[in-house]
Amino acid sequence: MVRNIKLLIEYDGTNYLGWQVQAKGLTIQGMIEEKLKRLTGEGVHLIGSGRTDAGVHAFGQVTHFKTRSEMDIRSIQRALNSLLPPDIAIKGIEEAEENFHARKQAKSKTYEYRILNTPIRSVFHRGYAWHIPQKLDWGEIKKATQKLIGEHDFSSFRSTGTPTKTAVRKIFRAEWKKGRDGLIRFEIEASGFLKQMVRAIVGTLVEVGKGKISSEEFQKILESKDRKKAGPTAPAHGLFLKKVTY
């Protein structure tokens, strides 16, 4: 009997070339598939909710795979976690419906981007937050952020040369949360995301915070559908795939 197993995965993407298997180099998908093959003796293919780029982290990547193995799911989870390196953990496991598909059935995804806005860099946040020492105008950043809500063509905020049927996505929520220690979290939930979309949005919003772009100009950049008019792409190490909703 073929079983459909759903995994909830947490990972530190620092040492990997992203989620998806590539011809050369370490990937999250490749690492887990290799360990599953050792466990089941099968050439297992993991299907993730979506790709994350090199250096991007995840609290809640969701994936599924088909197997004929009769191992119970708790044994699979324990064995996988014992075989995987310390920067990848299987946080949850369950038997899924036969037709469950981690990517096609996802209703929304939530990403979190972290900025450390302090004069001096932090040793402990260096791999997980973009350090910006200068003061930022958070009032203006929040005004610009509200322009993102709703359904738009996000061509201005995607990696150039990435083929997709449409650049239209719907943003349900986008908000900033400030911590006392200078760590600021940007949380954004959408129907889906384009390649490097969150990082391009954050990079452009930081330009707003620096006074280089006004919130009105941010709106025009969004409407222009021109990546060249937007700001830089924020570093990968500040980005986390937080949650996938089904």
Image: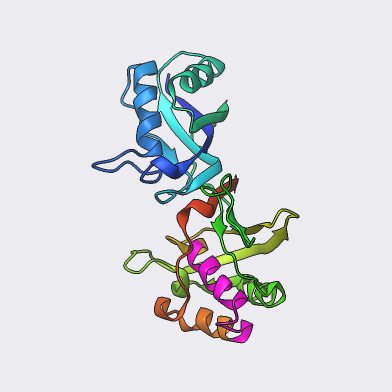
Q: Is residue 88 visible?
A: yes
Number of numbered labels in the structure image: 0
Residue 17 colored in magenta in the image: no
Q: Position of residue 158 (x, y in %)?
A: 43, 67
Give the position of the C terminus as an image quadrant.
Answer: top right
Which residue is more in the foreground, 240 or 180? 180
Residue at the location (44% across, 27% down)?
A: 85
Which residue is more in the foreground, 106 or 184? 184
Which residue is more in the foreground, 157 or 141? 141
Residue 214 colored in magenta in the image: yes
Q: Which quarter of the figure has residue 138?
A: bottom right
Left or right placement of residue 126 versus residue 19 in this view:
right
Q: Is residue 164 above or below residue 145?
A: above
Residue at the location (68% across, 78% down)?
A: 140
Left or right placement of residue 39 versus residue 174 in this view:
left
Residue at the location (64% across, 60% down)?
A: 118
Left or right placement of residue 24 versus residue 95 in this view:
left
Residue at the location (23% across, 42% down)?
A: 23
Give the position of the N terminus as an image quadrant.
Answer: top left
> Magenta span covers which residues?
199-216
Q: Is residue 94 above or below residue 227?
A: above
Q: Position of residue 63 (x, y in %)?
A: 48, 37
Q: Position of residue 128 (x, y in %)?
A: 54, 48
